[in-house]
Amino acid sequence: MDPITGLKNTRIANLDIKEEVLALKQSVSGDDKDILVGSPGLIVSLMNLKLINEIQLCVHPVIAVKGLPLFKNINDKTILKLLKIKNFKGGAVIFFYSVTG
């Protein structure tokens, strides 16, 4: 349990973001190897540093008039390869992509 947040499997990052993510990737193994990120700003930073291996996009059957763009300020074109698709009863779909370049 983290002494600052009081949460299990959580800690406050103190290093440069690239150093933090590389250290985190090295510290996890087996079934605990997934690192999930949901912050649009953090996703952009990690994409620009080439530190994301997989993207999961969840599409809901709703057309929103306003919202945050997911990939604003990405520096380079990124090629994605579709790995799998998961459908849900309510119509939502998750697309799983590997980041290939």
Image: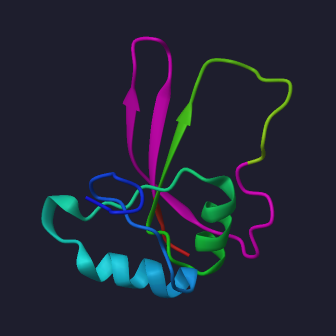
Q: Residue furthest left?
A: 30
Indicate left or right for 77 with 49 as reference. Answer: right
| Image x and y of residue 90, in percent | 47, 11
Q: Is residue 75 left or right of residue 42?
A: right
Task: Quadrant for residue 77, please give it.
Answer: bottom right
Q: Residue at x 79, y 35 (%)?
A: 67
Examine the rendered structure and indicate whether residue 76 appears above or below residue 67. below
- Residue pushed farthest front? 3
Instruction: From the viewer's side, name the closer residue of 7 and 31.
Output: 7
Residue 64 to residue 39: above or below: above
> Which region is colored magenta?
70-97
The percent coordinates of residue 40 (x first, y second) are: 66, 54
Residue 5 lies left or right of residue 71; in this view the side is: left
Q: Say which residue appears at 35% left-offset and 76% top-offset.
A: 24
Residue 77, above or below 2: below
The residue at the far right in this view is: 65
Instruction: Tell me: 13 left or right of 26.
Output: right
Occupied quadrant, residue 88: top left
How many marks overall? 0
Q: Position of residue 57 (x, y in %)?
A: 53, 43
Q: Is residue 77 magenta?
A: yes
Most foreground residue, 62 or 25: 25
Picture residue at 56% right of the left edge, 76% below the top: 101
Residue at image point 41% right, 84% down = 22
Looking at the figure, which quarter contains the N terminus?
bottom left
**Residue 14, position as x, y percentages in the image:** 51, 80
